[in-house]
Amino acid sequence: MSSQKGNLKKSGPPKHQNKTAFKNSMHDTSKKTKELNSMSISGCCKKCQEILEWRIKYKKYKPLTQPKKCVRCNEKTVKRAYFISCDKCIKEREECGKCGKNKEDLSLPEESSQEASRQESELHQELRNLTERQRRSFFRNEEKGNFKEEICSKSTIDH
Ligand SMILES: [Zn+2]
Ligand SMILES: [Zn+2]
């Protein structure tokens, strides 16, 4: 009888503890998927919101390549895929921009959502241009205030 059971060493935690909480971008790092994931769904009822989230999750979401005609104001102002009316009309009528019916649980589109995402991408651009040292101190400052520490895990700090 040979006893080769003595080799079940489990030594400590793994070296790289990556705590980033990415979902479907884990294996798919394409820009498109990232954009979809960061997109906030608004301007529609809860039910439609769930449908859209589902589409994004299972990659069935096809963003619009050009604005669609709004069924309310008849202008080519619909920028959200699967929506039938534009942000302006959604707000005015306070109805779901996708099914055009439900008024309950409606999350109205944010005024500044485009502006915010533009600012964010500018920030990312700036970060890319920073030196390693500047970037680290940036994240260190961020850590004090919010959740960015998860992204900036140990692996980036130890040199
Ligand atoms: Zn409209
Ligand atoms: Zn709806």
Image (cartoon, grey):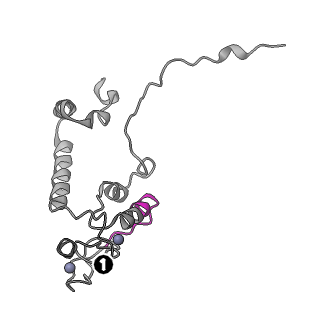
> Which of the two residues, 30 or 139, is positioned nearer the viewer here?
139
In the image: residue 116, left or right of residue 153: left
Residue 8, how many percent across, how many down? 64, 18
- Residue numbers of the magenta segment: 53-64
- What is the secondary structure assignment of the residue under circle 1? loop
What residue would you read off at disc 1? 84
Question: Relative to 11, is 18 above or below?
Answer: below
> Which of the two residues, 75 or 89, is positioned nearer the viewer here?
89
> Which of the two residues, 154 or 41, is positioned nearer the viewer here?
41
Which residue is found at the position 16% from the left and 31% from the top?
141
User: Which residue appears farthest toward the right when viewing the image?
Assistant: 1
In the image: residue 4, left or right of residue 34: right
In terms of image quarters, where does ligand 1 lie? bottom left
Which residue is found at the position 38% from the left and 41% from the top?
21
Label 1 CA crowd tier, 10 Å (few <14, some 14–19, many 20+): many
Q: Which amino acid, by three-letter code, is at mark 1? A: Ile
> Which of the two residues, 51 or 32, is positioned nearer the viewer here?
51
User: Which residue appears farthest toward the front when viewing the image?
Assistant: 104
In the image: residue 18, left or right of residue 5: left
* Image quadrant containing the C terminus: top left
Which quadrant of the figure has residue 88?
bottom left
Question: Relative to 1, is 141 above or below?
Answer: below
Residue 3, how many percent across, how many down? 77, 13
Residue 86, how many percent across, how many down? 23, 75
